[in-house]
Each structure stands twice: as structure tokens, then as C-alpha cells.
Image (cartoon, grey):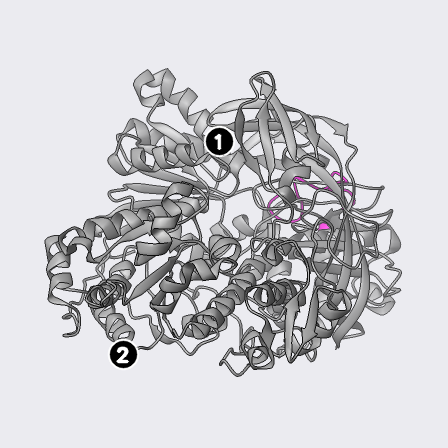
Amino acid sequence: MPPRAGRHAVWPDRIRAEVVAAVRAAGIEHPWAHQARAAEHALDGESVVVATGTASGKSLAYLTPVLSTLLDGAEAPNGRGATALYLAPTKALAADQCRSVKELSQTLGRSVRSAVYDGDTPFEEREWIRQYANYVLTNPDMLHRSILPSHPRWSSFLKSLKYVVIDECHTYRGVFGSHVAQVLRRLRRLCARYGASPVFLLASATAAEPAVAARRLTGLPVVEVADDASPRGELVFALWEPPLTELHGEKGAPVRRTATAEAADLLTDLTVQGMRSITFVRSRRGAELISVIAQERLAEVDRSLAGRVAAYRGGYLPEERRALERALHSGELLGLAATNALELGVDISGLDAVVIAGYPGTRASLWQQAGRAGRSGQGALAVLVARDDPLDTFLVHHPEALFDRPVESTVLDPDNPYVLAPHLCAAAEELPLTEEDLALFGPATEELLPQLEAAKLLRRRTRAWHWTRRERAADLTDIRGEGGRPVQVVEVGTGRLLGTVDAGAAHTSVHEGAVHLHQGLTYLVRSLDLEDSVALVERANPTYTTVARDTTSITVLETDTEIPWGDGRLCYGSVEVTNHVVSFLRRRVITGEVLGETKLDLPPRTLRTRAVWWTVTEDQLDRARINPEILGGALHAAEHASIGMLPLFATCDRWDIGGVSIPLHPDTLLPTVFVYDGHPGGAGFAERAFHTAHAWLTATRQAIASCECDAGCPSCIQSPKCGNGNDPLHKRGAVRLLTVLLEGAPVEKPDTPGAAQPSAGADGAVPGPPRGPEPEPTPRPEPEAGPGPGSGAEAGPGPGSGAEAGPGPGSGAEAGPGPRAEAGPEPGAEVPPGRPAPPVP
């Protein structure tokens, strides 16, 4: 990718001279044109989103007006006439930004008092921050659970609030983004009660329609600055397909070397050459594994190099994270295997290369990760190592899907009742809800309030709704959709806390017998206590890793809309999914060879969500030459591949969605394939699939048909986590079935009457996902499972875990994150298990 020259401008006159001098002292003589333009909008009181590439100086675009305004406020009688709030999706990014602010404001004296306020902040520092800091850096979780519920203690800060900075706002998508959107509406409501009306300044990676996404997130009109005027060094971007091995997988399918092993070799080679690099991995386990392999291989070359590579992931203790960030920033570490926690703006200058082990799910994330290489304008290398799955294989053979298409639109739905209801309760506890507040939270509010009253969560008195319980309303929901308290990972014998695992991932990652990696050391899980949320582990050196398996079944609750596809139907609506982790596989680390399977005794989990599904008729099966003997395999294969390809069309990861296929579904009475959102109430992904169904299933058919294997392989229709051992699968049948289905499909995008979407309210929130042609994101494969005989389901638990399942013969299932709770009720439960959420439709 060729270099690009930069375009300079001048700072607006209203930026204080002291701030301009501080910026120049930092070595920046003139701003890039997009920085100056964004600062002008901010000073004019207009909310603005800066959507430019990595290392384009987005931070300076919002920092200059913020610091200038803080200096103005410092001249107020109380010295706190202006304050600013900074929100980052990760603690690492907030800590890094705080360092940058302190460095930049050194010459500004005590006028700028910045501080990080998160779960790691010592309690003795918190009161000082509340009373004296004028630039507070935190995250949406802390805003939701701490700042807003205790707003009287923050009153002086909130009444002076001039700016709210939302960094890396493109990460607020799906259920998490919908929660953050409601948290921001709660913030705006409290600010208004204190007489403040802050301007929102958003920073985003390059994205489709950033102003639309920013408006949906904040509920306010937002101006867009997307013309990137920063220079860029040459970037060599390699698409790397691992070689075939001599091993054969299920049903004799050819097997490629794993992306993990290839990425570990690349990290080793780059480190030996003295190159500074990051290897991005999709899971916590993958980060640990790549770090361990690279350290072992480096020790064979030069023992001193082994200590210059480490893993970085969520779940580490705060002091471990900070130490790794400092070591990487200083150059003490040459290489890091990291989850996407380091994808986001943490200042790590001077990287020579980035290795991406497996497509990260969206083009936005891909470019964000690749952009970490070559900062300061120097040339760099980025390598995407393909996993052996349908999406990654499709991408390395169709590079135009990466390089010739725009990045994706951001999908979020603040009106999701599972999202909105607990935030209405939290808002009512903060200040009683009035009729004037209803428009702020959207049109679904009026319908939900009577249900919350009926559940005795809210009570209406004198034209206002009040919270009725003793417990904190903010504890009703986990805004990251993880559900339940984290499971503590404790070492047997010493009692030492190693870290934590999200409750939703516990069933699949720290079940009894699971291999658990932490900072390069291997542990075996001896027990998992779901009631006390504790997993006991002990040191071990197994030659294998473990992968959980699960079963999935699905029930149609309501069909919102359906359209004819030839004789069949394409439908969208509400479903109930029951997921059950039933066993785990032991696989050799490098080859992936299956060594055995062990049964597990864990409770099922139930999820009410949204799904897209399609049916086929007997006439269509006849035209596709699909007889009863191969029907289950054809459906199962089409399901696997379609789940693998959906992330090319919706801003989701394959872990965000799930699927089930069955030759005769009891609700449709026809052969049916389902793809559903893996989050309570839905996340917008299945709806996007409904709107892009023709393009989505066309790409699915193309991915299967173009694969050179004979009967199916991991690159097209097989999944490494299929609970039925990828049986039955019928590659040619899937191609013929999809061909006939697409012949009768309307090319134009269907409309979705009644689908839950963000709707325009009095606050200016705009309707959810745009109706025009959708840009295509990108997919990857996951787990699979199956409900009953003759059905197929692919299931994948939460991010960073691998779950699998398999019920009876002739079935398979791929499940999304699933109901994220330690235990689940029987099917038919009104609320996702583990969540004290209020009843919703």
C-alpha cells in the first residue's frame, strides 16, 4: 500500500496560545487538516466524530479544544469552571491517554488536573478525583456502575461538564454498544438536571457512515470529519495461508497447519531479527499459547530473547497489565501476543510489524490492527495469517473483499428491551423518571414502563416513576453482556488469585479438566464451582489443549416478517435457544489431533433472542436433487458455511452468532436453517443478515463451490468444534441447495416491519441499521452442536472461549455467546438465566 503525503492547516484562533505552545513543544508544529477542522466544530459547540486511520492524530483533534476550555474554566472563582469526561472501551487505553495528557499539559501548570477513575483506582484517591480533577478518564462500565448512581458526589464535576470524549467509538457495537448508548442518555439526563449540556467528541477508526453511528450512540446530531490528512508510510500487507500437513481430519479432510503455530513462528523470526512487533490473537488462550511457543523457540536460539516476548490479555491483574504496557512502550519487550485490548489506540510507537492470527471479524478491526505498525510515518509490514475456516480461506483467495470494499457500518439497537429496561430502572434510581424523560430514552420506553411497574421494579407516584428495591438498579445488567459475576481462577495449594474469566465463558473455558494458560504457565482446572464463581487450578504440563462441546436447540416464538424465496420462505423474528455444554475434547497443541472426549455435567442455559431463518420445500429439494439420505448433510453444510460468512456482511464476530439446521423443524414443518444473535433480545446481526440475505447466501455458495477439496474441509464446510464430528455434511448437496434457493430469491433488500430498531425520538436518535445496500464485513468459524437427531447446530460461546457440542447422530449446531450465566432455567424462562433483569416482551 503506497505512502501518502500529509496536508497541514492552522489551529483555530480560539485555541489558547498556551495549548498551541504545548503542542509545539511536543514536536508538532502544525496540525493536520482534519485535526484543525474537528477542533473548530468542537469550539463551535457541535458534537463531532473524527473517523480517520490509525495514528492519524485523532487524540490531538479533541485534546486541543478540551485543554483550551479547561484553561478557561480554571479562571473561574472555584477553579473548576469547566470539566471534561473521557471514555475508553479498555482500561489500558484510558491509562495510556492519561499519560499523554499529563505529558502534553506539563507546561500548563495546575490548570489541567487529569486522573484515571476505574476499578483499579485506589479508594483513597477517588474523593480527590471527584472534588478536584477537571479531566477524568474512565470507561463506560465505571460510568454505569459508579459515577451515575452516585451522581450527588459528582455534582460539581457534572454541573461544569463541557465535553464528553468517546474514544474508539467504533467498538461500541451490538449489545455492548446498545448498552453504552443508554448509559450516555442517562449521563445526558443528569447533566441537564445540573444545568450542563456537554458537547460530545468522538474518535473512530475509518468506518461507514460514522456520523450516523455516532448519532445513534449519543442520541444527538453529530458532524462528521472523515477526510484523513495525515501522512502514511508504505505498508506491505501479506495474506498468509498456512501449508497443508500430512495429517487428515474428520472424514479424511486435508488439514492445514494452524494459524497459531504459523503466527508463533513469525513472532519468533521477527524477534530474532530485532523487529518490534505485536501478534494479535482472537482469544485469551491463543495469546498465551503463541507466547509460550515463541518463548520456547527463542530459548533454543538465544535464552536472553525468550524474556523479550510476552502475552497480553484481559483477565490479568492490574499490576501485570501496567507492567506489560510499560515494557512494551519502553522497548524492553520486542514482541507481544495480544488480544484486541492492544488494538485500541494505546501509544506503542516504532513497531516494525503486526501479525494478525486469524481474521479479526471486521475490516474496521483489521485495519485498526494493521495500522499499529509503522507509526510516525515509517514503512511497515502487516501479515494476516489465515485460519483453516471458510471466511479466512475466502479472504486470502479473494483479496478484493478486504482491499476493494469500504469498512462496515456499526450495528447497535438501543431500543432492545433487554437493554433498555434495566437502564430505565437505573435512571429511575438516579432521579425519578418523568414523562419529559421518555423521549430521551426512545419510543420503546412507554411500552416498557407498565411492565416494570407490574414486576414491582418501578412505582408511579405523582407523574414520576421511582425505583422500589433496596438493591442497586445499576447491578441489574452487565453492559458488556457477560452476565453474572466473573469466575475467579485460584491456584490450588497456594490460594493465589491468578485472574478472572467472564461468567459467560466459564462453562467452556474453565470447566473441570480444562487446560488454562496464564502468563506462559499451564494449569489444569480441578473443579468449577458455579455457585461461588471459583475455578480451582493447579500447575501441569499437558501436551494437549481442550475445547468444549455443546448442544443447541431452537424454538420459534414469533415471526415478525417473512418473504417468499421461490417456494420457500425467508423469515425474521424471535426465538428461544437452549444451549448445553456436554463434553470437551483434548487436542494436540500443534497438530490439532483429537486425543479423546470427556463428558461434563453442567446445567443448560436458555436465551431469548432474534434470528433469521430460511425454509425449503419438497419441490426445491427435488430440483436440487436432494434426497432424504443427504438432506441433513446439505443443510448442515450450508449452515456451517453461512455462519462462517455472515461476519462479511454484519459487524459481528462468529462468536456473536449461532445457528441450527434441522431436516424437519417442529415449528416450520419444513427443512430449516436458523442463524441467531447470541445475546438476549438480539444484537442486530440477524436483522442485518435478513436485509443482506441474497448477497450473504451468494457469498456462502461461492465459498463452498470454489473450495478445491472433494467432500468438505475446514476451509469450506467443516468446523473444528462441531458436536457431531462434522457428520453429516454434504458439500455438493449444499451447493445445489443454495443454488436453487437463490434462484427464487428477490435481489432487492426486504423491509422489516416490526423489527426492533432504534427509532427517532425527540432527542434526535435516528432509526437503526440503514436500509440501503450494506457494505460487506467479514466472517470466521466457530463451534458446533446439535439438538436432536437429524438436525444441525453450530454453537460458539463467548469471545475467547471455544465451545462445542454434539447431541445425536445426524445433527450439528453452532451457537453464539448464548445465555451468559452460570446456570440456566428450563426452556420457557422469561428472562435470560443469571440476570435479575426485568421482564420484557
The kind of residue tagged 1 is Glu
Q: Residue 401, how many percent across, how many down?
A: 47, 60
Residue 744 makes an appearance in the image: no
Please report the bounds of the magenta region as a residue range: 714-731
Q: Is residue 81 above or below residue 638?
A: below
Residue beneath label 1, please?
A: 288
Q: Residue 119 vs residue 759: left or right?
A: left
Q: Residue 193 vs residue 17: left or right?
A: right
Q: Is residue 752 above or below residue 359?
A: below
Contact, mark 2 vs mark 1 (Cβ under 8 Å): no
Q: Residue 420, how many percent across, how many down?
A: 62, 67
Q: Is residue 725 magenta?
A: yes
**Near-viewer residue (784 or 199):** 199
Instruction: Tell me the CA gap for discs 2 and 1.
Output: 47 Å
The kind of residue tagged 2 is Asp
Residue beneath label 2, please?
A: 44
How busy is the neighbourhood of tag 1: few (under 14 within 10 Å), some, or many (20 plus)? many
Residue 224 position by quadrant: bottom left
Mark 1 lies on a secondary structure that is helix
Quadrant location, the N terminus: bottom left
**Near-viewer residue (677 or 543):** 677
